[in-house]
Image (cartoon, grey):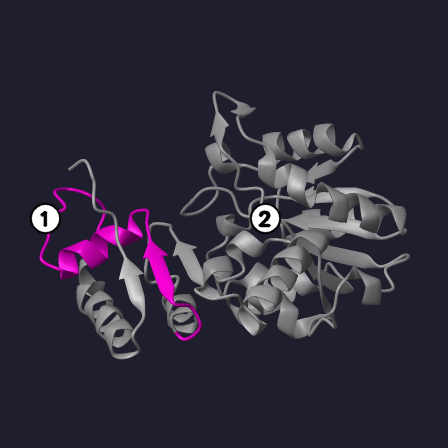
Amino acid sequence: MTNTFRTLDHADVKGQRVLMRVDLNVPYENGVVSDATRIERTAPSITELADKGAKVILLSHFGRPKGPNPKDSLKAVAAEVAHTIKRPIKFVGDCIGDEAERAVGAMKAGDILCLENTRFHAGEEKNDPEFIAQLAKLGDLYVNDAFSVSHRAHASTEGLSRVLPAFAGRTLQAELEAFEKVLDKPERPLVAIVGGAKISTKLDLLGNLLARVDVLVIGGAMANTFLMAQGKAVGRSLVERDLIDTAQKIMDQAAVNKRQILLPVDAVV
């Protein structure tokens, strides 16, 4: 299959500063990473780039901080990444500015650096052009290996891909190839399962899926908004009340297109 996107196979990374978006937003309890699955999945891309002589600069968010907060620092998570890949990783206490620029400037081919939580800056979630430019100063190429956050138009996901040569890491590549296989020539009936807390971050995704699948299964807290749109009581569960009408429109459109939406039947309220 011919990819419609560029992968690490298309990137000449030797000696280049590679800004690599990874998802290090991992479960963290009592000072310990309790589930390193996301780290383990992206590890091959990190080591491949380093082995090819890149200067690997890791970018990620962690939690939902409203500014710098020590409890949302990536420092301990960076140590877990180093433990997983069995290589040293230097941690830097900011993702932009003089400290970050000095650290990147001191890197040698094959070095790996982890910058501080991108969400410590409001410009990350706002996809602010000035913040994007400050991040882009640190790199020559951009690699996205964070499929789980790629639906968000943030500075370190969507923004950097517009201002630097952009490539998919191995994790993102595998997910996109799976999508291409399923969505281009699927076996019928085709069922998609979508979860998460918010409809607002997945509106485009839901619309695209409804145009392609036969059955859409909605779970997680997102389902609460759909259930409330149907007039069902959800107690004090998380609901996006301002999107109840949107949820109803999605269900109406599914009915028009003869698509089935499945919602949870058994729930504890």
SS at badge 2: loop
Q: Quadrant of residue 156?
A: bottom right
Q: Quadrant of residue 243?
A: bottom left
* Residue 105 seen anywhere in this rendered image of the structure: no
Mark 2 or 1, which is nearer the eye? 1
175 relative position to 188: left or right: right
In the figure, 43 relative to 53: above or below? Answer: above
The numbered dot on residue 75 is none
Q: Which stretch did the figure color magenta?
A: 211-239
User: Residue 233 location, x and y as percent?
Assistant: 9, 48
Question: Camera-side residue: 32 or 92?
Answer: 32
Question: Camera-side residue: 66 or 60?
Answer: 60
Question: Label 2 is placed on what type of residue?
Answer: Ser
User: Residue 57 location, x and y as percent?
Assistant: 73, 50
User: Residue 235 location, x and y as percent?
Assistant: 12, 42
Q: Quadrant of residue 164?
A: bottom right
Residue in the image at 77% along x and 57% along y: 18
221 relative position to 36: left or right: left
Question: Camera-side residue: 144 or 64?
Answer: 144
Q: Which residue is mark 2?
A: 60
| First in residue order: circle 2 vs circle 1 | 2
- The quadrant in which the C terminus is found is top left
Q: Residue furthest front?
A: 188
In the figure, 136 relative to 61: above or below? Answer: below
Residue in the image at 71% along x and 31% along y: 84
* Residue 80 seen anywhere in this rendered image of the structure: yes
The numbered dot on residue 233 is 1
Q: CA distance from mark 2 to mark 1?
A: 37 Å
Specify whether residue 212 is painted magenta: yes
